[in-house]
Image (spheres, rainbow, N blue to C red):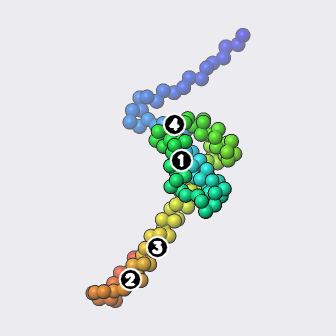
Amino acid sequence: MANTKKLSLINDAAMGEYRIEAYDSRKYNAVFYSIRELYGKVAQRQLGEAFDWETFKQHFEISFGKAEERKYTMEQLLAFAKDKFDYSLEKLIEYNQRSWQRREQWLKRQATYRKLELVEQPITRGDSSFVAEVAAEEIAY
């Protein structure tokens, strides 16, 4: 019989405060929230006008718990995502990244709309030309 060497894992406990969690643990929230959003979108298509995001989130929390509670293991979440959406870990991570990009774009649009609303507000006091210049400068940013 040939001797086979076993691969010993590196113990990074001495890293102390610099120690990081395993990859799966760090990606748990991304997987959890991707599943919640995907599940919600499918349910929204099925229910149409009757769908309510807040009510859905409450039902989702009852079934899945909160992300920080980690009611299910990463393996359980990935098996669920594979069964319901045919999504792997990689696809869920990509989906989560696109979701964050959409959210950031939405926030930028909202900030622009708020600045435009400030410009359209009627001037009630003070030098109107100065206020208009300040508003125009804010929009330029």
Frontmost of labels 2 and 3 is 2
| Residue nearest the observer in this picture, 18 or 119 | 119
Q: Quadrant of residue 137?
A: bottom left
| Residue nearest the observer in this picture, 47 or 42 | 47
Residue 33 located left or right of residue 133: right
Q: Which residue in the protein does label 3 denote?
A: 112
Q: CA distance from mark 2 to mark 1?
A: 42 Å
Dot 1 amino acid type:
His
Frontmost of labels 1 and 4 is 1
Quick check: marks 1 and 3 in contact, CB under 8 Å?
A: no
Secondary-structure class at tag 4: loop
Frontmost of labels 3 and 4 is 4
Residue 44 x/y as whole percent: 62, 57
Residue 14 located left or right of residue 84: left
Secondary-structure class at tag 2: loop
95 above or below 107? Answer: above
Frontmost of labels 2 and 1 is 1
Residue 57 x/y as whole percent: 52, 51
If you read the primary sequence from the N terminus, does the residue marked by circle 2 or circle 1 appear first?
1
| Residue found at x 59% / y 53% | 40
Residue 110 x/y as whole percent: 47, 69
Q: CA distance from mark 1 to mark 4?
A: 15 Å
Q: Which residue in the protein does label 1 denote?
A: 59
